[in-house]
Amino acid sequence: MKSFGLLLAFLTLAIANPVAQYAQDQVPMGLPTQYPGYSLDLNELRFVELEGEAPVWMTELEKINLKSMGINFLDITETQELGLKAKSLRKFSFPSPNATELVEPILKTLSTKGPEENLRKFSGFRTRYYRSDTGRESQQWLLNKISEVTADNASKSLRKLISVNEFPHSWGQNSIIVRINGSSTTEDETLVISAHQDSTNMWPFLPAPGADDDGSGTVTILEAYRALIAADFRPIRSVEFHWYSAEEGGLLGSQAVAQAYEKRSANVIAMSQFDMTAWVKRGTREEVGIITDFVDPDLTKFNKDLVEKYLNIPYVETKCGYACSDHASWRKAGYPSSFTIESSFENSNKNIHSVNDRIDISDEFSFTHMLEFSKLAVAFAVELGGWTK
Ligand code: BES
Ligand code: ZN
C-alpha cells in the first residue's frame, strides 16, 4: 500500500515538478548532470532507507526528487553498520539541574556580537552544499574560526585539554569535532553538543544561504563554546562540539560519526542537537521547541528542566514526525539524543532550503532568540559535564 502511495506521489510530481519529471529517465533531458563547482553526479547510485521500509538503491537525482516531494529518507550507503552493535538503547539517569552558581555567571557573558558577525560571513557562501566547492570552503572557514576562538579564549593550560579535529568524509566537506577532555579517570563519559554546517536548496545547484538552517545552530553552539572556555570550563566528563557535514544529504555526516563512535564503544551519555534557532514567527509567543519524537525521553525532560531554570522564555513540546535531523543518527546508534528548535514545528521558518533563508529577509530572524539557545547549550555542558575543582 505504502509503495503504491509512493508511486502515486512520484507520478503526480512527474507532472507538477519540472525536476521530478525526469526521475525515471535519471538524466534530465537538456539539463547537465555535472555542474561546475560541484562534485555531484546525478547518476551515482545511493542506498536509501525510507521510513519503515527496506533500503533500496536509487540515483542521486531520485533522492533529490524524493526530498522535493517531501518524502523523508536516510542515505545509508556508507553507514550500513550503524546501530548493529546497539542491542538496546543506552539508558542514563539525568540529574535535576543544580549548578546555578557555575552556570549563571557564564550566561551573563554570552553575546549576540560574535554569532551575528559569524553568521553574516557563513551565510554569505553561495551554498554550503556538502558536494560543492563552496561547501568545502565554508567548512575550512568554520574550522579556522573555531581554532581562532580557541586560541583567543582558552588559557594556555586549558588549551592542553582541547583538541580540534576534522572528521573526514569521502565527499570533501568534513565534519568538525572539538573535544574538551574531562578530568574523570574512571569512565570516559562524553557529551555531544551539535549542529549541522551544510545547507541546501531544494535543487542543490541553486544558491543556499542557509542562515537559519543551520547556520543559526552552527554559530549558536560556537558562542556557547567560546563562553565556556573563556570561563575556564574544565569538565569532569568530556564535552564535545560537533559540526556535521551533509545533514541535508540524508544525515550522512552524523551517521558516519555516530557509526565510528559505536564501533569503538564510545560512552556517549547524551547528544543535544541545535538545528534552526533564529526564527520567531510574527504574532507568536517566543519559545523553545522541544522535539519529542525520535529522541530519548529522559534527556528531553532534562532539557525542559534547563529551559525552565535558565532561559527567559518557555518551552513548547513539538514533533517533526520523522527523523528530521542529526539526533536521529545517534538514536539509531543506541545513544540518548535530543533536539531543541526555534519554535513549534508549525511556526518554524518556511524559507529553509531556498534562496530566502537569509538573515535580512525579515525581522522574524532574531539574534536574541538565538542567544537563548546558546544559554541552553552552556547549561547543558556545565550541568551534565560537571566542573573539576
Ligand atoms: N532543519 C531541517 C529539519 C526541520 C525542518 C526541522 C523544518 C524543523 C522544521 C533539516 O535540516 C532538514 O532539512 N532535514 C530534512 C531531512 C533529512 C533526513 C534530509 C528534511 O526535513 O527534509
Ligand atoms: Zn534542512
Image (cartoon, grey):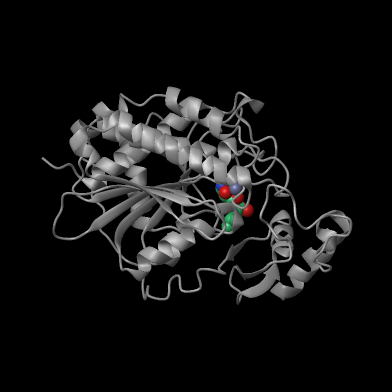
Q: Is residue 89 above or below residue 195?
A: below
Left/right placement of residue 293 relative to residue 178 reads right
Q: Is residue 171 above or below residue 179?
A: below
The image shows residue 127 at horizontal and vertical percentages of: 64, 41
Q: Residue at the spot x=45%, y=66% of the render?
A: 332
Q: Residue at the spot x=47%, y=62% of the render?
A: 256
Identify which residue, 184 or 347, lies in the foreground: 184
Which quadrant: the N terminus? bottom right
The image shows residue 33 at horizontal and vertical percentages of: 78, 58
Left/right placement of residue 297 relative to residue 256 reads left
Dividing the picture into quadrants, the one containing residue 358 is: top right
Q: Residue at the spot x=46%, y=29% of the render?
A: 115
The image shows residue 255 at horizontal and vertical percentages of: 48, 62
Identify which residue, 113 or 274, lies in the foreground: 113
Left/right placement of residue 84 relative to residue 240 reads right
The image shows residue 333 at horizontal and vertical percentages of: 41, 66
Residue extending furthest front?
36
Q: Is residue 344 visible?
A: no
